Image (cartoon, grey):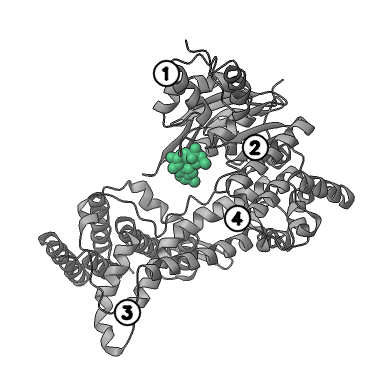
Amino acid sequence: MPVIETRNLSYTYSPGTPFRKDAITDITFTAQKGDFIGIIGHTGSGKSTLVQHLNGLLRPTSGQVFVNGIDIWQQPKKIRSVRFKVGLVFQYPEHQLFEETAYKDIAFGPKNMGLNDDEIDKRVRLAAQFVGLREELLQKSPFELSGGEKRRVAIAGVMAMQPEVLILDEPTAGLDPRGRDMILQQILDYQKQNQTTVLLVSHNMEDIARSAKKVLVMNHGRIVMLDETAEVFSRAHELESIGLDVPAVTRIFMSLRKSGFNVGPNAYTVKQAYDRLLPLLKKGGGSNA
Amino acid sequence: MLSGITIGQFFPGNSLLHRMDARIKLVLTFAYIAAVFIPRNWAGLAVAVGFLIFTILLSRLPAKLVLKSIKPILPIIIFTSALNIFYVTDGTPLFDWAFIHITTQGLTTAAFIAIRIISLIAGSSLLTYTTSPTTLTDALERLLSPLKAVRLNVHELAMMMTIALRFIPTLIEETDKIMSAQKARGADLESGSLMQRIRALIPILIPLFVSSFRRAYELATAMECRCYRGGEGRTRMKQMHMRAFDIVCIAVVVLMAAGLIVLNFVLPPVI
Ligand SMILES: Nc1ncnc2c1ncn2[C@@H]1O[C@H](COP(=O)(O)OP(=O)(O)O)[C@@H](O)[C@H]1O
Ligand SMILES: [Mg+2]
C-alpha cells in the first residue's frame, strides 16, 4: 500500500472572485514507503500548493488524498493527526521560529503530539544531531543564529516529530553552496537511516540529481512527468520547453556526444560523470567515434 | 483561511469608475454617505439604493463582491435592527407578549435603517474596490494639502497611510503562511479554552512581529537608497486630471441629493 496517494486532486485559490486561480489540476500520483521523490517545476507551477494538500493544510477543491490508504478528509476533526504522520517543512522555514531557545523551538512539534518530556528530549537531541546542530547552539535564541543554522533548527523541528513522510519545500533556497550541500547531505542521511519517505521540492537540478530516485515534474498545475531520475533528465528538450534545466554535467555529456565523443549514457551527478569519463580518459583521450 | 477578507481590497479593472479622478471619487463617496441619511420615505431610499446599484453596474465588479463587504458588519446590522424592533413602540401592535411589543413602526424603522447601513458600507467599499490604496492616499494628500497652511505634515501622513495600506495584503499573506507552518507542526488553533487559544497565538504573533520589523528596516533602507527625504520639492509622475465624466458625476450626485430633499417635503415621512 502506498504511504501517500492522491486521486484527481485539484485546488482553486479564491474561487468566485476576480483573483480566482486554478493552482493544481487533476494530480494523481503515489509514493511508496522509502521513496525519495524530487518535485520540480518553474515558479508558480503549483509545487507548494500540492505539498500542502498532503498533510491536510489545504482541503482539495476536488479529489482525494490518502495517507496509508485512508482518506485524510474522511474525519476532518482528526486532521491534526495527519500532520504528525506527514511532516512538512515550509519554504524559508526560519521565519516560523518563535521560542526562546532553539531547543524549545525544535520541541514545539513533539510537544503538540502530547509526548512525555523524556521522549521529547530524546527526539529533540536526535533531530539536532541529524542536522548537525551543536549542543551549545541549542540553548541560544533562534534569532541569534546564522541563516543556515536557523534553517537547520526549523528542519529539525519537523524531523523531531519523526513523521513517516518528510516533505521539504525548497529547503536549500537562498543558502550558500556549502550550506546547501550540508543540508542536502543531512536529509539524505536521515532518509537512509530511518527509511522515511521523502518528497523534496527544489529548483536546483543538481540537488535533485544527487538525491532523488524518482522525479515528479509539474507545469501549470499539472504533472507532466513522473519517472526515474535518469529517465526524466534524459528528456532535456521537454524540460527546457517548460522552463526547466538539466544538471550541468548532463549538459556537458550531451554536448560531448554532439561533438562526436562516445561517452555512453547521460550522467546526471558529478560522481557518475567522474566514474564514466575517467576510464575513457585513461584509454587515451576517449574513443573518438 | 484569511482570504475571505475583502474590506479595503482593490480589484483592478478598467471601468469608468476605476478611471474616475480619485479625488472626485473620494469626495463623492462622502457625499453619498451623507446623502443616504437624507431620505425619510421609501421613495427617497429607493433612489439612493438605485443610485448605488447603478454605480455597482458601472464598476463592472461582480455584485457578489459588494455583498461580501457587508458580511463583517452583519452583526451590527442585526443588533441595530433588533433594537429598533423592540424599542420602537408607536404604530399598530403586531405582537404583544410580556415585555415584547412588536409594532409596524418598529419593523419599518428596522428595515429602513438596515438598508441605510448596507448602502453606506457597500458605497464605501465600492470606493476601495475600484481605487488602488496608493491612488486613494494620493487623492487624500491632495485634498488635504490646504492644511499645510496650518503646518500639518500632510505628505508624511499620506505616506504613512500608503505604506500601512500597502502592507495589509502582505501581512495577511505572511500570517497565513506562518499559521500554516505552525499547523504543520501540530499547533492547535481551533480548539481549547479561551486561555489556550490566546496562548496558541504566541507562535504566530512572534514570527509576525519579527518579520514586520525586518520588513520595516528593509523598506526604510530602500527608501533612503533612493534619496527619499519627505515631501519637500517632490514632484509627481502621475498627475490627476478632472475629465468631463467626473463633472457629470458631480452633477448627478448633487442632483440626487437635491431630489432626496425635495422628496422629503413632497411625501409623508415613514420614520
Ligand atoms: N495563497 C494564495 N492565494 C492565491 N493564489 C495563490 C496562493 N498561493 C499560490 N497561489 C497561486 O497558485 C499558483 C501556484 O503557486 P505555488 O503552489 O506556490 O507554486 P510553486 O510552489 O510551484 O511556485 C501560482 O500561480 C500562485 O500565484
Ligand atoms: Mg513554492
Residue B40 in sight? no
Q: Are marks 4 and 2 on the same chain?
A: yes
CA distance for labels 3 and 4: 35 Å
Check disc 3 and give the amino acid type.
Answer: Val
- Position above or below: A89 against B260: above
Q: Mark 3 points at which residue?
A: B154
Q: Nearer the viewer, residue A148 or A59?
A: A148
Mark nearer the N terminus (4 vs 2): 4
User: Which residue extends farthest front?
Assistant: A284
Residue at coordinates 23% horizontally, 53% vertically from top-left?
B54
CA distance for labels 4 and 2: 17 Å
Tell whether label 4 touches label 3 (CB within 8 Å).
Answer: no
Q: Nearer the viewer, residue B28 or A44?
A: A44
Q: Mark 1 lies on which chain?
A: A
Tell me the SS state at disc 2: strand
Check disc 1 and give the amino acid type.
Answer: Ser
Q: Which of B117 and A46 is in front in this view?
A: A46
User: Which residue extends farthest top?
Assistant: A289
Mark 2: few/some/many CA within 10 Å (<14, 14-19, 20+): many
CA distance for labels 1 and 2: 40 Å
